[in-house]
Image (spheres, rainbow, N blue to C red):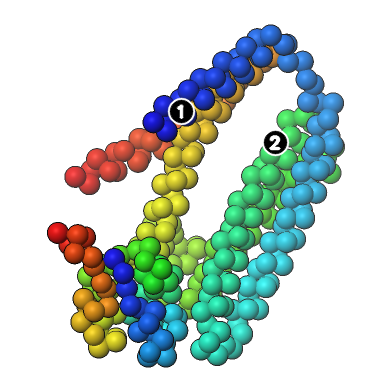
Amino acid sequence: MRTRLKELRARNGLNQTELAKRANVSRQTISLIEREEFIPSLLIAVRIARIFNEAIESVFLFEEEEIE
Amino acid sequence: MRMAIYVLCGAVVGFIAMYTTLSFQMDFNFLSIAYHVNVILTTLTAALLLYIVLSILQMWKKSSDNLSEDEEDEMDIWLYKKFSDTNLLVITTVVIGIVSTAISLITNQPTWLELASTVSVMIAFALSIGVSSMINRFYPDRNLPSVSEKDYAKKLLAASDEGERHVMLEGLYRSYNMLNGTLIIGLFLLILYSIGTGVSQLFAIFVVSSVLLGSNAQYYLLIRKKT
């Protein structure tokens, strides 16, 4: 899974700590997701997508073979 | 394949160790150097304790700094790494302190050395509580349990989010596997030592075996329940 989290964060002028506070998770979790070392739960993915006013699938990008 | 190589290497090392042990009588007398080892370990414990206190003060000061938005992430990373390093140091100090105390009490060292070793361990234990409680200072907004609370470890795990749990799981699983392997090697070393020196290490062998059985039983019974 790839993610546009870093790009969206930069676009919205948010640091990891601020995004973590808004998504109600730790900064470490945001960092792990950004580094693509951890796939978040649906709940956290929805929260993050809502913060950026984006659809989940435009924040978290899956390769076709990952979904099949 | 990797497992087969490990087993083969283990067998070769075991054979060489066993052959060497049986060929040479181990007549090393630890008592002759016990005093010096004890002094070195106690001094090391005291130095580590001092370093831990300095680290706590550093973290305390940094966590009360007013930060701009740009600095927030860097500070959190710094605190997180410092907190992990300090926790590792505390555990190291506790272990070295316990070994030092064991040497002083078992080999009848001078009273001042026995006292110094024992007090160092007690301070190390107290500091371990102090370091753990720093987490509440770093994240006052989070509903983290206090160190004095009952079932602190359980509550801390429950208060952690999924990313933190993912990191903990990775670390703990590696540590669990390493502990299993090293304790079994430890058992073999104790057996070799007993054979080589004629000094029975059966009590230690029973203790290590019980720890191995206990921790594995806890792990496998827990995952079995979660079907």
Task: For marks 1 and 2, give the CA distance.
Answer: 37 Å
Disc 2 designates what residue? B102
Q: Residue at x 44, y 42 (%)?
A: B176
Q: Amino acid at mark 1?
A: Ile
Left or right of residue A54, residue B110 in this image: right
Outermost residue toward the left? A68
For the C terminus of chain A, give its image quadrant: bottom left
Point out residue B92 in the picture as x, y percentages from the top left corner: 64, 49
Left or right of residue B167, residue B71 in this image: right
For the N terminus of chain A, give its image quadrant: bottom left
SS assignment at label 1: helix
Q: Residue at x 78, y 46 (%)?
A: B42
Does B197 sit above or below residue B150? above
Point out residue B30 in the picture as x, y percentages from the top left corner: 78, 25
Which of the numbered marks, if any, corresponds to residue B5? 1
Residue A29 visible, this orientation = no
User: Residue under mark 2: which chain is it in?
Assistant: B
Does B159 sit above or below residue B221? below
Residue B104's image quarter?
top right
Q: Residue at x 51, y 89 (%)?
A: B69
Does B133 sit above or below residue B1? below
Q: Earlier in the sequence, mark 1 or mark 2?
A: 1
Q: Residue at x 60, y 60 (%)?
A: B85
B126 and A8: which is toward the camera: A8
